[in-house]
Amino acid sequence: MPRQVTYKVGIENFEKYRKEVEGAVQEITVEVHELDAEPWPVDTPLRHVGHDIPRLDAPAKVTGAAKYTYDINTAGMTYCGFVTSPHAHAIIKKVDASKAESMKGVLGVKTFEGNRATYPGYIAAGVCAESPGILDDALQAIQVDYEVKPGPCTTEDAMKPGAETVDMRGESNVRGGRPMQRGKIDEAFGSADVKVAGEYRTAVQTHSCLEPHGSVVQVNPDGGATVWASTQATSGFARGAFLRGLGVQRNRVRVLTEHMGGGFGSKFGPGSWDAIAAEFAAKTKRPVKMLLSRRMEHLLGGNRPDSIQKLELAGTKDGSFLGIRGETWGTAGNGGRGAGATNTMVYNWPARAMRQNGVNTFSMWGRAFRAPRHPQGSFAMEAIIERYAHEIGMDPLAVRMKNDPHPIRQVQWRIGADRIDWKKNRRKVPGSDKGVVKRGLGCAAARWSQAGRHMSRGGPYTVDIAIDREGNVTVANCVQDIGTGIRTVMAILAAEELGTDPSLINVEVGDSRLKPGPGSGGSTTSPTIGPAVRTACVVAKDSLKALLALEWNVDESKIEWTDGDFVDPAGKRATFPQACSLIGDDGLRVSGQRQRNWTSPYRETAGCQFAQVSVDTETGVITVEKVVAVHDCGRVVDALTARNQVNGGVIQGISYALYEEKQLDRNLGDMVNPTFDTYRIMGMADCPEIDAVMTSVVSGFNNAGMMGLGEPATVPTAAAVANAVFNAIGVEVPELPMTPARVLTALEGKQG
Amino acid sequence: MSDDSPRDDKPSGLTRRALFKGAGAAAAAGAVFRSIEAGAKESDTVPANVQGPGTVPVELDVNGAKKKLEIEPRQTLLEVLRLPLDLTGAKPVCDRGTCGACTVWLDEKPVYACTVLGVEAAGRKVTTVEGLGTPEAMSSIQKTFVAEDALQCGFCTPGMVMSAAWAVKKHGKDLTEDQARAACAGNLCRCGTYPHVLKAALACARKGS
């Protein structure tokens, strides 16, 4: 029977600030499933959850012992690589692979003659060889003749009337999105005291995972297959063309992702490259190793689409928003997803009207990239808010707080403002610093809305738990640890629930023989799996109670779990290890299912960031000096890894704001900077002081109060930096990345 | 900066200038091989010190162990470490001396293993991340990386550990933040672990090893 539980949710730290905000702590009543764990209310003292706990896999990773897909060296390994088209649009007329085929040590060549290559990096031929050296020789010996066709590759060129279309059917590359409208938009703009309009642009950013996409594929003599894949969705990896190429029944394919070197949204399904490797593995009956080259990774491995955003804001002269409207365009490549900009969220907009358009271009499609559409949208929306505040002569933070309905973010704005010393360090008059180097502050808001899922189309998410008579605990699910620390989160929750230590918990993940796990997307991994770990522990403890009941000859319903011990009414007591000693030699194995989410007053996770920058007005160089990032991920399970993840979001955000741009040859469409020396990502030398602050918020959605973190942490950074630049120099730089040239252009416009 | 950036050190640290010079030499060697294929007499064209094509015997000193190997002269130290030796801590990422994921020590100084040929490492002391410690017996810097959570996905981590360890070794307790930054400035991390790496390097230096 489900039970009603009334308990307190909301912020459980920052006592001083939470008292100032109504709704920062609230009482709710939820219906808890009989097998589910009791929710932990605000201010529950916990032994491990919420503390700084080093990640379980760290010793293997810092010593080089951790084996990634790229590191698999099995006996008889062969190597697969590709010849790719350098053209935006071409027909692959002829592939002469005769020399390569006759080379000693070349095991297979697959060509794609006649194919229409609609993006640079399109695979014209694949080769499988006995050594990486022979592979290189063979790839260089392949000659490809192309019939080059027109292929507009930038968003603007592809939008022009009469432009060559990617799908060859439509008359236009613009795939108009459905217009979204809420409230009375014309009335809002008709009655506004103040209207501000702007046009903003962002560049294509590549995921730039350090470990490229790829897999090691082995067809086993028994007819099954083993695949090591660098993926963020291990459970569902064996599918589609990859599975067909392998020629092995799906239930005989084992996929392993013990460690993987970064995904950020780009590594969900297998690629065409994996399918070719699978075909070679099936043909040669030898293991095939295929990892994309750095150039292919930049071209094909995924990107965040660019954007052109036209926005208008209507407001009152005392700082209340009345409405926002606009239209956005972004390159979808060959018809992919994720183009557009989400920029009417966060604040109270009485009226809003937006239209997001994807534009097909002759380039590889975009892939989900850490908070798809959000950093683009945040940049433009927060910039126009900044200009509005300037127009009406109000503090831009005060304007944001006035229009922000989220009680948690109301607390966070206060924390962040104090830690960056907003009152003292913000320039009351933007651009008012004397001298060449000018400083300023900016801020922006983050949002996300994921509290995890209780099931996939394969049924409820289930965590297995195995306990032996020595008290060793194994917690297992196929979910993969992409660097965000789910392994450690699972160990912490199990240790908390079982009264043991996280370092003693063995966690098994990233193996498709385990119960299906969620793909690591949407910041759902921890809030999906974490509560199921607790549920599994509850089931395990019930099994131990049954063993104790036999031993003590009492009714098992009388045995309670108190202070980490099992106790019965007569005063008998057993520690967790004592109870485990009753387990038979075959061990105790049970499972717990993720239960449905409850409803919470905190529908979204909140966050905000503050940036302090200096701008050299002679060179145009922006230096980010400090960022304060205040975030909510529901209840914090591991404070150490959470802060690390927030740092990472900020760093990727600054890198996006200042450096990263996929640059195309304007005539040929090929990427001219597909290397790490020409496509800059932020390094240690540019890294500012980052003050990552977690407000731990019991969300009320699930037994652990968890929500997601990875994505919101990168949403507002570029916007906060851009607003700080505005505050420093008194003029906005409306295009990302804010390169020195763009800064100088903006300054020239100001003088002119 | 130059004092603290290992890759600007002379003579053993590899500079970009040296790399490009090396690439020029390799191109010249390529021309020699083609002339051999065209039928010229070997003794007429090949200087005595040219190795290859085909494999040549080398003896490498890796993590204190002598390894006798047959390798192709064109193979980089990184390829040799990862494939025949199965020391996969050093990672291939950028393949052109930019990202630092393949950082190892050559005669106690950090180098990008993708820009050193395997044959060049013969007779010199190579130290990889596996040589610093194992999960059961970690070195001081590795322990501090764990404690400060100076990693996420971990793919850049072995290289980052080698650079940070070198900074600690060179400057000891007096390691400054700027020196630690400079030492790791050639190591890219996409997850954004720099703040924790910096903390780990400084904490390790303060502890002494």
Image (spheres, coloured by chain):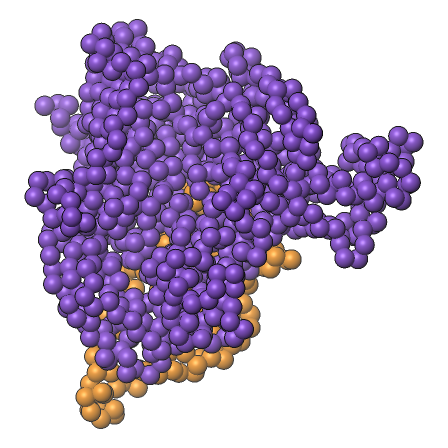
Chain colours: A purple, B orange
In this view, which residue lies farthest toward the front? A1
| The N terminus of chain A sits in image quarter | top right
Residue shown at 21% from the left, 35% from the top: A176
The residue closer to the viewer here, A98 or B174, is A98
Horizontally, is A268 left or right of B86 in the view?
left
Q: Residue B28's spot in the image, x, y percent?
A: 22, 76
Say if residue A437 shows up in the picture: no
| The C terminus of chain A sits in image quarter | top left
Horizontally, is A245 left or right of B18 in the view?
right
Q: Residue A720's spot in the image, x, y percent?
A: 34, 27
Splitting the image into 4 quarters, where does residue A421 fall? top left
User: A46 above or below B199?
Assistant: above
Horizontally, is A15 left or right of A520 in the view?
right
Q: Residue A385's spot in the image, x, y percent?
A: 29, 19
The residue closer to the viewer here, B28 or B99, is B99
User: B122 above or below A632?
Assistant: below
The residue closer to the viewer here, B203 or A298, is A298
Residue shown at 88% from the left, 30% from the top: A569
User: A700 above or below B137?
Assistant: above
